[in-house]
Image: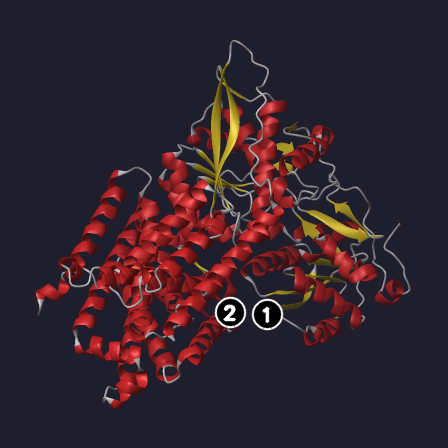
Amino acid sequence: MRGKWNLLIVGLFVLSLLVTGCAQQEQKPEATPTPEKKAPEEKPEKKVETMYFGAPISLTGKYSKEGQMSLWGMQVAAKWINDVYGGLKVGDKVYKVEIKYYDDQSNKEVVQSMIERLAVQDGVKFILAPYSSGLTLAAAPIAEKYGVLMNSHGGASDYIFEQGYYYVVQTLSPASKYQTGFLDMIKKVDPNAKRVAMIYKDTEFSRAVFNAAREYAEANGFEVVFDKTYPKDVQDLSPILNELKAANPDIIIGGGHFADGQLLTQQLAELKINVKAISILVAPALPKYYDALGTKAEGICAPAQWEVGVTYGPEAAKKLGMDYFGPTQDEFLVLFKEISGSDEKPSYHAAEGAAAVLSYAYAIEKAQSLDPEKVREAMNDIEFMTLYGVWKIDPETGKQIGHEMVIIQWQGGTKKIIWPEAAANADPYYPIPTWEEKDQGKLAKH
Amino acid sequence: MNIRAYKPLIPMIAVYGVLITIALTVDGMWQPVAYFMFYIALGQAFNIFLGLTGYVDFGYVAFMGLGAYGMGLAIKNFGHLGLIALPIGIFLAVIMSMLLSLAVGAVALRLRGAYFAIATIGVNEGFRYLVEGVRLWGGTEGMILSGFMRKTYGREMTNFFSTFLSDVLVILIAFSAAVVTIAILNKKMGYALLALREDEDAAKVMGINVTKYKIMAFITSAGFAGLIGATAWTLKLTYIFPEDVFNISYTVEAIVIVMLGGAGTLLGPMFGGLIYGIMKYYLSVIFPGIQLLILAPILIAIVVVFPEGLIGYIRKKARDTRLSEYLR
């Protein structure tokens, strides 16, 4: 009897492994195409060597989707550096960049051994941090022990940078900035909209986002009239939404992930809670949100780290008086297609990964050194733009302070970027149509 | 004390010796060995319950999570007293996980087979929701200790905790769990457990207090789980998220490790953990992204070929030879 039990359990486990494995396989028949290296035009006086950036990537496990995207982004950036830019010039040498990566399985135990392997056995000096804040934190002590630099492209939480790890720097916007851009926008478009309601999921990440949003709102003259969380697997939000309605807010910010963000929108519509603007985390940024909700999604905003269509480019950089480094968005999209071998559009994870590689490259050339300490020092003074936006860190903590979240809004069935002005490709539609108007088919289109 | 009964520890010490030597002499192998040791410790601790009683506890990770919180609370509240916080943390971890296991065991261990397994899943999930829902110990935001530890103990010392001390402690825990296993096997408790594992009703008829022995094994096993959580997680990672520490996949991994090596054997969990850890590590280095597709068939093959686990199989083959004294 017991033997059967054992077999059953192991069988189930193996099955689950297979399922995750297959899910992986589906997306990535050519998951790891080492980009063919066309030798850059040899300049006879310069020696070409290869430099490795190391990356523990979550190719399996719960962050596998994000991990794969960021890996493609990194490979695109490396390919651009090698083929278009002609390699990194440090002293009299030219370095080609290659991404050395292992699968960390989205697992905190594995990450640590991977970092050690990269730092010691592979001699990598520049590491692209693992995906997610937890894994980044797990990796930090090992990275510090070996004196290697770590650049976070998927760890948004602010606390990573409050622990005193000098060698950890951040490329993406921290959680504290997720909803502040939206508040800035409201302040600009309608200075009279003061009453803010916050309704968000009880997770570590959402709490970080909305704690910061509350502080920011209060400091900027908004009044937070409603502030409640809902549990992770919520099925019905109507009790809290009725309370929210009674608070009579001008704008609503909230959300957490996809399912709850969709539910939130759905029930706001059912209860006919009309406000002037709504910004929800994560869900509206995904195309399936509009597929599921149709015109109900009109006018809903979401913060995003990046979005295809942002207008960051050499011209925008010139306006701000800074360098532009890396592929333009069009080049990026072409290279991305080539490397990923699929028609899938790059998500913001890909742009983050690419920006992290580009920031290393830019800082290494500025420092004219491969010494992590010198590169870290050089990072203190650089401010430049990539397709992902501005890159500038706080010298002391390494936290990203240059990059701004973009705000997207569903306008007439398409996602438009409406903020910040440097990246926008449309004007905000404000105030958004009421639910009754949307029911009659009104779109949030100018 | 019968020294001969402890002979099977000799091959174990030899394997540990080799692992530690590799870790200390080969550059960049310390963390991988620490990773293998984590799985060995997990298997060894879980084996005390699953292996000896035949009961499958799907909520096992709850004890590890609780142990992690025990250490976290000690560092947070007693950190200002200096290094004494660590022994306090170890103590808290053991006490907290044992108390929970006593409470769970007293109720759930009266259930059998699948009913017991289902009840224990509930414990784990319930505990996680308790921590998150009532915002106990930081709720969903967990505990982030890195900065605090670095301020209290200094950067060097904290890195020493994370990258060396915690690993050494895990090795010690794994070894102590093995010693406890063999001690139990050699005692009346071991025979009682063996009897109840094979046929619980028959054991009862023979006058064995089955519930008592089951609870004893359960609590011992839970205590070790608490220790692993305190060292391999809190001390090493310097943060605790409820989602991470109450993650059921660790329970499943523990079950697989014990099955691979041989449930109820002494050396089984060590070989199971070692094989599982090595395969997971090297496959993800060599075939990043597709390693699970390779790992899964290997696991199936091992379980089909060796239904009693590797050590179970070798023991059968080596019966009545001198080797059998060293295998258990």
Is B142 above or below relative to A77?
below
Front one among A52 and A39: A39
Which numbered dot is residue A231?
1
Which numbered dot is residue B205?
none
Image point 83% across, 60% down: which residue? A295
Image point 59% across, 15% down: which residue? A41
> What percent of the width, then of the height, locates residue A286?
71, 53
Graded by Cα atoms within 10 Å as few (under 14), some (14 to 19) or many (20 or more), the crowding at tag 1 reads some
Residue with the mark numbered 2: B132
Residue type for callout 2:
Glu
Quarter of the image for the N terminus of chain A: give it: bottom left
> What percent of the width, then of the height, locates residue B232?
35, 57
Front one among B275 and A289: B275
> What chain letter is assigned to the residue under label 2?
B
Residue A356 shows in this picture: yes
Q: Element at badge 2? A: helix
- Residue A402 image-quadrant placement: top right
